[in-house]
Amino acid sequence: MDLLLKNATYIDWKTLEFSSRNILVREKVSSLQFISDSDTGAVDRDIEIIDCSGRLVTKSFAVGHHHAYSALSRGMSAPKESPQNFHEILKYVWWTLDKCLDPAMIESSALVTAMACLKAGSTFVIDHHASPFAVKGSLEIIAKAFEKVGVSHLLCYEISDRDGVHVAREGLSETDRFLRDHQGLVGLHASFTVSDRTMVKAVDLMKRYNTGIHIHVAEDAYDQGQSLNKHGRRVIQRLEKAGVLSSPKTLLVHCLHLDENEKEFIRNSPAWVVQNCESNLNNNVGYFNGAGLGENIMLGTDGMHSDMLRSARAAFFTGQRYDNITYESAYRRFRNVHRYLSENSFEGDGDNNLVILDYDSPTPFSHENFFGHFLFGITSNHITDVISNGKLVMNNRKIMTVDENEILGESREQAERLWSKMQQDS
Ligand SMILES: [Zn+2]
């Protein structure tokens, strides 16, 4: 059903202009229609009217890098052996977890992630998935779960040789199968777990489907060390030589440990960088600095959570010491994901994706001081309603598309199953 948002304070997410609007939102039409007060009576009877008096309406958000597969990890026990570095964090925690995932757990992870995204105002997710012992069909499970909740997506399977040639081959096949019918990317875990042979095959897929590679890059100095030892060149030189950087759809995630030459390669390429500040803090791998990386920088959550406002704030605060970030560039990085999606003609992020916020500011709020409110005032707690592709998917903080309690109840059961499986396997 079409929607009429009456008496809204609309903030244009590009110009940051504030205006009083009645907004007509349609499912089939991605652009918005503004109508005058006198014409609101003339709209179709078959329309849902939402009174937005005193509330803000603006474009919804999108997650530049997520891992729905990690959703069931929250609150699980620490690994038996305590990780001492980044590679051990992967081995003892994430690579133990992802090997235990089965289709039911993958589905639960995707459903709760999609719900968390909507609650935090995101209607589009770029996800990087791994389940080495349940590869086949995993992307379809995630796609269906996201769509059921009302979240658009750009998915990929995290192809890697870390579990042997057979699993790497399965990752390539799953990618090939999924890309035949869906928009998506070709996922690679990271340079240090991908052989030259697998890299070539992944880039072939990327070219065949005219898409990009989605890969973790220099998250830790370990990635660089391995690249130099095994391949005789640094990570970005290796990726560049393989053709990864040639696509404007390619996502280079993290990019912490790069030298000036590598930054120049990225700056002069059409590829994008995705910053995930809180994950870097948690893994104690270093600090992101956007200086020298060009303008194509966006933000993600790296599976830590699903709240992009939080990611923007963390990037800004951490950046005070380690980055060249400003109020304005923090906002620009937060919104750059829309530029990435639209410039590459990905579907699902049109203008009919909106959030409604109940933000009763104690101080004046306008075009002039927007950034101050963006970084120090507005949180996901202010989001009351979310519209995804013209459809009201969250109303008064309640998700309309699925039964939240049922999904959370199921995910708690799946989490217990996962945790006990991990105990047996580790
Ligand atoms: Zn990641």
Image: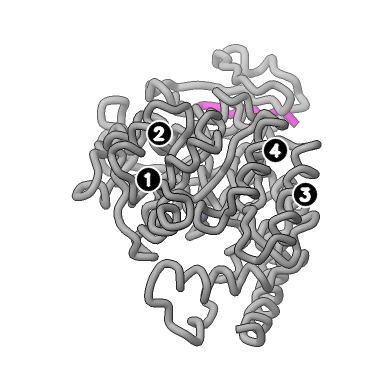
- Residue ID for mark 3: 173
Separation of disc 4 and disc 2 at Cα?
Answer: 21 Å
**Helix or strand or loop: what does disc 1 sit on?**
helix
Is the CB of mark 1 within 8 Å of ligand 1?
Answer: no
- Picture coordinates of residue 406 (x, y %)? 73, 66
Secondary structure under badge 3? helix
Q: Tell me the amino acid under the disc marked 1.
A: Ala
Task: Choose mark 1 or mark 4, whichever is in front.
Answer: 4
Residue 212 — which label?
none
Q: Are marks 1 and 2 in contact (CB under 8 Å)?
A: no
Query: Reading the chain from its start, which is encountered first: label 4 or label 3?
Result: 3
Q: Can residue 63 be seen by looking at this rendering?
A: yes
Q: Sequence order check: which comes first, mark 4 or mark 2?
A: 4
Q: CA distance from mark 4 to mark 3?
A: 10 Å
The region drawn magenta spans: 1-8
**Residue, disc 1:** 312
Residue position for label 4: 205
Q: Is residue 192 magenta-colored?
A: no
Please report whichever mark, 1 or 4, sits nearer to the chain's N-terminal start: 4
User: How packed is label 1: few (under 14 Cα within 10 Å), some, or many (20 or more)?
Assistant: many
Q: Which residue is mark 2?
A: 266
User: Looking at the image, which residue is at 56% across and 32% down?
Assistant: 249
Depth check: 232 or 290 in front?
232
| Residue at horizontal 30 percent and vertical 43 percent from the top | 259
Q: Amino acid at mark 4?
A: Leu
**Secondary structure mainly formed by the magenta segment:** strand
- Mark 3 surroundings within 10 Å by alpha-carbon count, few (fewer than 14), some (14 through 19), many (20 or more): some
